Amino acid sequence: MLTVANQKGGVGKTTTTVNIAAALAQGGLRVLVIDIDPQGNASTALDIDHHPEVPSIYDVVVDGDPLASVLQECPQVPGLWCAPATIDLAGAEIELVSLVAREMRLKNALEAHLAGLSATERFDYVLIDCPPSLGLLTVNAFVAASEVFIPIQCEYYALEGLTQLLKNIELIRVHLNQRLHVSTILMTMYDARTRLSAQVADEVRAHFSAEVLKTAVPRSVRISEAPSHGQTVMTYDPASSGALSYYDAAVELAAGRSVGDHS
Ligand code: ADP
Ligand code: MG
């Protein structure tokens, strides 16, 4: 279970979530994407209906509805499921403040759902797409997952804010979720023509040698076009450099893990 987080906006959280999820599902795994960003971009990219009347992760986190009541399967990628976010979720950050167990609500819903699944229904991966903030929705994601997956955009300000993110993860680890750790870092929007991209990548690798995936995702027009067609780049243009690099990143992510290990 991975939370895809970075409080900076536009660094590739959503793009990474949906494309890694699609790549894993295309490889035959069962994958669940939880869209916990009120903007609902992951839901859009997976072609999941998320207009305001659709049952969504808001109903789960705020009203305590069962997760099963909001799940939809991605039409293009069998085995890839999504709990969509609607605009309702924009109010959840404030509504959660006064609720019981406000940091645990996603975790409780997920655990209840996963515990009731049969062997064939089990998910191999759960990926949570976070909003660009460190508010209660992101805290819920950190409490629910054991791993943090950080996409880092290869540009000058990339490392600013990373310290803050790591501090918050440490706070959550100490107070709310002992298992939480940064397991994976992916360099995104890498531009091989610029020295800056290489410098940022080198610096990140120097700090996090074990966690950074060898694959860096290049800047690719096909990646940015895919969501407007309600698709991930994995189905929109599977032979493009962007799709191939997300495929490689997914293989790296999955390497060394045994499928069906739900510990
Ligand atoms: P976040 O979820 O962190 O806010 P997004 O995944 O939505 O970031 O990405 C921000 C913007 O950058 C989107 O318009 C997306 O299509 C585009 N984008 C993301 N990754 C790439 C890439 N590798 N190449 C080109 N555009 C990208
Ligand atoms: Mg996003």
Image (spheres, rainbow, N blue to C red):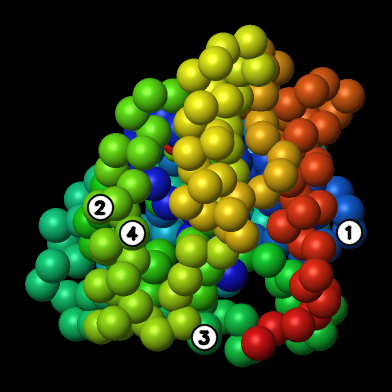
In which quadrant is the N terminus drawn? bottom right
**In the rendering, which numbered label is found on residue 164?**
2
**Where 36 falls versus 7 (above or below)?**
below
Q: What is the distance, in whole Å, between disc 2 and disc 1 at their CAs?
A: 37 Å
Residue type at numbered disc 3: Ala
In which quadrant is the C terminus drawn? bottom right
- The crowding category of the residue bearing disc 1, from other C-alpha atoms within 10 Å (few below 14, some 14 to 19, many at least 20), is few
Residue type at numbered disc 1: Gly
Residue with the mark numbered 1: 28
Mark toward the start of the polypeptide (1 vs 3) = 1
Residue with the mark numbered 4: 166
Residue with the mark numbered 3: 112
Report if the CB atoms under discs 2 and 4 are less than 8 Å apart: yes
Q: Nearer the viewer, residue 179 or 101?
A: 179
Extreme-front residue of the structure: 206
Q: Can residue 65 be spotted in the picture? A: no
Q: Position of residue 175 (x, y in %)?
A: 25, 83
